[in-house]
Amino acid sequence: MFDTDPPAAPRPTVVHPARRNAEPLVEVQGVSLWYGSKQALDDVSFELYPAEILALIGPSGCGKTTALKLLNRMHDGVRDLRMTGRVLMEGQDIHREGLDPPLLRRRFGWVAQKPNPFPRSVYENVAYPARLHGLVRGQAALDAHVEACLRRARLWDEVADILHTTPGTDLSGGQQQRLCIARALSQMPDVLLMDEPTGSIDPIATRAIEDLMLELKADHAIVVITHSMMEARRIADRVAVFHLGRLVEIGPTDRVFADPVSPEARRFIAGRTG
Ligand SMILES: Nc1ncnc2c1ncn2[C@@H]1O[C@H](COP(=O)(O)OP(=O)(O)OP(=O)(O)O)[C@@H](O)[C@H]1O
Ligand SMILES: [Mg+2]
């Protein structure tokens, strides 16, 4: 389907300077993916390093969400989906025989664009993943875990008194998104996958989530999709620019925005910021 595209531009792989000596946590190697006859990814390769924020940017429909779902096998079970290439986590193929997908998924917290708390109490929202994956034993330990996750998501002070009485769905939009982050943290993930996490909340709540992401990256690699170039510049260590299913450029945020190499990235960034 990409036969009308210009020839593929060179794809420089620039390693984040601070990570030059670190082993990648995740490696996507030459992945192409089709939904039926529709190709959504075309020979995509990138690496994710511990303690970095990697932003995926590009026009609507260019494959960002598809690339994010690749990392935790969220495409499993989708009918007529075909994929070639490999995804490695800590050097091991995530599609290898014998790997238990729920165990893999436990290592990736997912945060969606629209906050989606369960219609249960604030406490239950955060306790659920820890119980599901058997991560915490005993009521006292679970209480402490829920509190720690809510504190890390900077929500504790606002909900400490209503933990058991208020459904997560009754919180404000920004609070709901922080609750969803607390819920994601509850499964003790190595990576947070965030698909436009600030796409449906107001600017003040957005800044709170961005500050939170900058804190959380000390302990979690974060892959975030954003349509805001300002946001990518504020929070990302590296950006990956997608265009029609191809990853056309990846590199340190400042360099990619100041001096994009590929014509597609140059056009996209100029169009969004110029
Ligand atoms: N389940 C699916 N079945 C068929 N086609 C799909 C499916 N999911 C996505 N696509 C198609 O694959 C392409 C890439 O979609 P994807 O959702 O990854 O794009 P995106 O970059 O996240 O877009 P947006 O910025 O609008 O969220 C699009 O053309 C989309 O229509
Ligand atoms: Mg998307």
Image: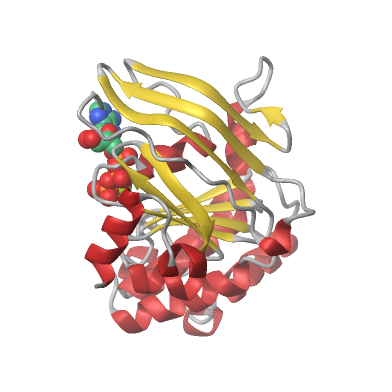
Residue at 44 percent of width and 20 percent of height: 83
Picture quadrant where residue 9 is located: top left
**Figure check: 20 above or below 66:** below
Residue at 54 percent of width and 64 percent of height: 182
Q: Nearer the viewer, residue 83 or 111?
A: 83
Give how far across and how far down residue 171 sits, in percent. Answer: 35, 73
Residue at 42 percent of width and 25 percent of height: 32
In the drawing, does residue 124 fall left or right of residue 80? right
- Which image quarter holds the N terminus? top left
Whether residue 233 is visible: yes
- Which image quarter holds the C terminus? bottom left
Give how far across and how far down residue 163 sits, in percent. Answer: 50, 72
**Figure check: 3 above or below 120:** above
Picture quadrant where residue 68 is located: top left
Residue at 57 percent of width and 46 percent of height: 13
Give how far across and how far down residue 107 sits, in percent. Answer: 63, 44
